Amino acid sequence: MQDPADRPPNPDGAGLKLQLQPGPLPRALASVLRIQEREWFGYVLALPALALIGLVVLYPVIQGIILGFTNASTLNPGQQSNVGWQNFQTLFADPAFYNGFPGASAVVNSVELTVIAVMLELMLGTGLALLLRNKVPGIQVFRSVTMASWVIPVVARVMMFNLMWLPRFGLVNIVLRDIGQGQLNTYWFGSLNLAMPAIIIMHVWRNTPFFAIALFARMQGIPNDHYEAASIDGASWFSRFRHITIPGIAYVAMIMVIIHVLWTFNNFDFVYLSTGGGPVNSTMVMPVYVYLQFWHNYTAGYAAAAGVVMLVMLLVVTIPYILTVREAES
């Protein structure tokens, strides 16, 4: 018997199996779909954003670090030479920048302001969040106006507190005099002992509602069944707060603390507009110190060196935060 494969083709084409070849457009679409499945395709899509971030963020940071090792001056732009570590040696020899702990210097004041302000914001924000969650009578009014401290412009906010601290006529001093604390009747922003507490109060007044709203939103996600079961077991209010609420809000609280540490440490406008770093460097913080060195003393290289020190100090806080977030997400 003859093999079908050896038979001659039928002249009229009967019995032939036709295979249609896709056109160029379907083939191109299929190739694109196959590329999208590749692992490196996501990096290709992210390249424009990464290039923009590198141009806007990374390049200025690298240039600032390089500038910190030069004697650049804003009076003679382009005329600079490498001075090695000289700027950093001069920096730490300046008592206005660092004068040991404790002491009125930019480093100490920045750390003191950041630690105290953020701790108070966290504690007061947690308390306000608990009041919001427990629906204390009248607390809804706070919920309605809570973000007013963020709406008010910085200049108006500083002027408002400046009027409150005025001697004789300021609201705070009037209250202190009426309660028998007239010895504290002074201009707070002009006092060596009260200027920094006044700035801390401004920070706390501005940021506490933000802590409260964020922590309250997280508390809303904690199931009520946990609290009810703990109450049935005879757990006290403090035990419920310690073993249920705190673990439930810990992650959000950590993120809020890190964000506000970075923001408070880098804050410039509060101090510069209220005291300018005085009196006698009692409120001098690192952002104001960098500004004064750059724009008042025209020492761009020296100011950049101070900025590099700020960068290192912030990385000490930021890197553990990034590692913690990655561990929590994994």
Image (cartoon, rainbow, N blue to C red):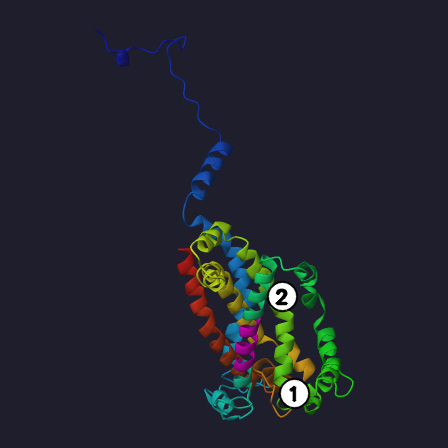
Which image quarter is the N terminus in?
top left
Mark 2 closeness class: few <14, some 14–19, many ≥20 residues within 10 Å: many
Q: Which residue corresponds to mark 2?
A: 209
Total marks drawn?
A: 2
Q: Is residue 112 magenta?
A: yes
Give percent across and percent down for residue 285.
58, 83
Q: Toward the viewer: 136 or 301?
A: 136
Which image quarter is the C terminus in?
bottom left
Asked if residue 60 can be seen in this view, the reply is no
Q: Which residues are magenta?
A: 111-121
Disc 1 or disc 2, which is closer to the eye?
Answer: 2
Q: Toward the viewer: 62 or 232?
A: 232
- Residue at coordinates 40% horizontally, 11% vertically from top-left? 13
Q: Main secondary structure of the magenta part?
A: helix
Q: Toward the viewer: 162 or 71?
A: 162
Q: Is residue 142 left or right of residue 126?
A: right
Image marks 1 and 2: residues in contact by CB distance under 8 Å? no
Q: Secondary structure at mark 1?
A: loop
Residue 296's quadrant in the figure?
Answer: bottom right
Q: Which residue corresponds to mark 1?
A: 296
Task: Check disc 2 and give the amino acid type.
Answer: Pro
